Each structure stands twice: as structure tokens, then as C-alpha cells.
Image: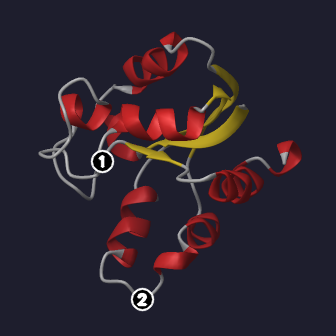
Amino acid sequence: MSQRTLVLLKPDAVRRGLTGEIISRLEHKAGWRISALELRTLDRATLEQHYAEHVGKPFYEPLVEFMASGPVVVLIVEGERVIEGVRALAGPTDPIAAAPGSIRGDYGVIVRENLIHASDSEESAEREVKIFFPGRA
């Protein structure tokens, strides 16, 4: 079944010049395609909407500040089992726990600055696409 997912290449990925490498990994996965891609600096209102479920958690403010600290690449990726697949390709949030060959396993440094966000379910993907690409919802 074809799906779509939201992917964010976070400020650390952009700062470190890893966007081309990460996008290449997404494009080389058979059957996946990028249907939207933009470089943006995210405002606080967008980030508050995106991370609403984390309000009040100790990592919330540092996360919002980090995500607003520089440009991000915002993508919609479509394809067979793409939600599960992109999350597997990204690897676990902790780069030490992430396997070599995953994005975080190969390039991750610290947990909070972990290069990539990918929707974790069809419901999240639908909600997140509406936030970042309202005209494509």
C-alpha cells in the first residue's frame, strides 16, 4: 500500500552539509519518490503545533529552540511502506544505539540534534503534512 510521510532534515543536517546525502538515500530506495521539498526556517508557531504533544516535557523548550536555530529541509516522501521504511532508515534517536548504515548511525552525534524527523504513523503523517504543506493535505 502506498503511503506518504513527512520528513524534516533538521538544522544540524543542513549546517553539516548532509542534506544531499540524506535526500540521496531517500531517492535511492526503490519505489519511493519525493513529492514536495522546501528549505525553510521554521517559526515558533509551526514548531509549537508540530511538537504539541511534548509541551511540558523537559526536552520541549530545547527542542523548539534547536529546530528554530537554522533552516530545515521539509519533504513529503511517498511509496510502499514509506512510514516504517524512513524510520528504519533514520535509525533510533540515540546515535550510539543506531546501527551503522542508518542515517543517525552514520552521522548522528547527540540525541537532541539527531538530523532527521519522520512521521511515526499514518495519522501522524497526515497531521504533519497538513502543518507543513497545507495545500497538499
Q: Amino acid at mark 2?
A: Gly
Which residue is the extreme one toward the right? 135
Describe residue 29's horizontal placement relative to residue 114 as left or right.
right
Of the pair 108 and 78, the residue shown nearer to us: 78
Q: Is residue 43 above or below residue 22?
A: below
Residue placed at 43% from the left, 48% from the top? 70
Name the residue that disc number 1 marks. Answer: 114
The number of numbered discs placed on residues in the rendered structure image is 2
Protein image colouring: secondary structure
Q: Residue at x 40, y 56 (%)?
A: 69
- In x, y percent, where is residue 72? 50, 42
Mark 2 lies on a secondary structure that is loop
Disc 1 marks a residue whose amino acid type is: Asn
Residue at image point 42% right, 89% down: 56
Classify mark 1: residues with Cα within 10 Å, few (<14), some (14-19) or many (20+). many
Q: Classify residue 51 as left or right of residue 126.
A: left
Q: Dot 2, crowdedness within 10 Å: few (<14), some or many (≥20)?
A: few
Where is mark 2, residue-wise?
56
Residue 14 shows in this picture:
no
Nearest the camera: 95 or 18?
Answer: 95
Pointer 2 with pointer 1, Cβ within 8 A: no
Mark 2 and mark 1: Cα distance apart in space: 21 Å
For this rendering, which residue is in front, 40 or 8?
Answer: 8
Q: Is residue 52 left or right of residue 122?
A: left
Picture quarter containing residue 74? top right
Residue 47 position in % (x across, y down): 56, 65
Q: Is residue 36 visible?
A: yes
Q: Residue at x 84, y 48 (%)?
A: 137
Point out residue 62 in the picture as x, y percentages from the top left corner: 32, 71
